[in-house]
Image: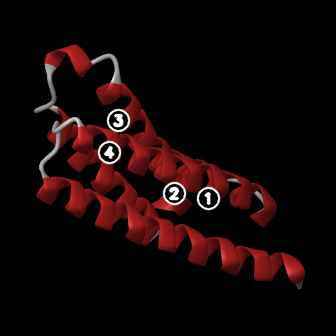
Amino acid sequence: MRPHEKLDLWKKSVDLSVAIYKITEQFPREERFGLVSQIRRASVSIAANVAEGAARRTSKEFLNFLSIAQGSASELETELLIARRLEFLSSEDYATLVDQIDEIARMVTGLSNYLRTKLDR
């Protein structure tokens, strides 16, 4: 088992990406290479950066990748807001996805804080 596979953060991030892929299938075709591509990339980036960071040798390196994952979560939330305002997403789907992003962002912050305490020792 790889180190990231033990992390609930990574599992929830993968679940979010799967949900994003399913929901964006309903977006207009003309958005396939625009907003859909951006949204999907940002969602995948969260899980990918958690995985890559967990595989690194030092807490400092892991923190860097968690910072990137946090940035991708913020990017994703912004893109979903745009999609909602364009009425590509229902209010319910938007709220569900934002709740998932918020939970993931809190988990990233918690893990980052834990890793920082390890560095301070």
Q: How many marks?
A: 4
Residue at image x 12%, y 49%? Answer: 90
Q: Position of residue 47 (x, y in %)?
A: 46, 50
Any mark on residue 40, and which? 3
Q: Position of residue 92 (x, y in %)?
A: 13, 59
| Picture quadrant where residue 108 is located | bottom right
Q: Which residue type carries mark 3? A: Arg
Q: Which residue is mark 4?
A: 80
Image depth: mark 3 or mark 4 in front: 4
Q: Nearer the viewer, residue 96 or 104?
A: 96
Q: Counting other residues with Cα less than 10 Å from the Cα at mark 2, is it few (<14), some (14-19), or many (20 or more)?
A: few
Any mark on residue 54, and which? 1
Question: Which badge, 4 or 2, is on the more N-terminal residue?
Answer: 2
Question: Which badge, 3 or 1, is on the more N-terminal residue?
Answer: 3
Question: Which badge, 2 or 1, is on the more N-terminal residue?
Answer: 2
Q: CA distance from mark 4 to mark 2?
A: 31 Å
Q: Counting other residues with Cα less than 10 Å from the Cα at mark 4, is it few (<14), some (14-19), or many (20 or more)?
A: many
Looking at the image, residue 41 lies above or below residue 31: below
Any mark on residue 2, and which? 2
Image depth: mark 4 or mark 2 in front: 4
Question: Which badge, 2 or 3, is on the more N-terminal residue?
Answer: 2
Image depth: mark 2 or mark 3 in front: 3
Q: The residue tagged with tag 4: helix, strand or loop?
A: helix
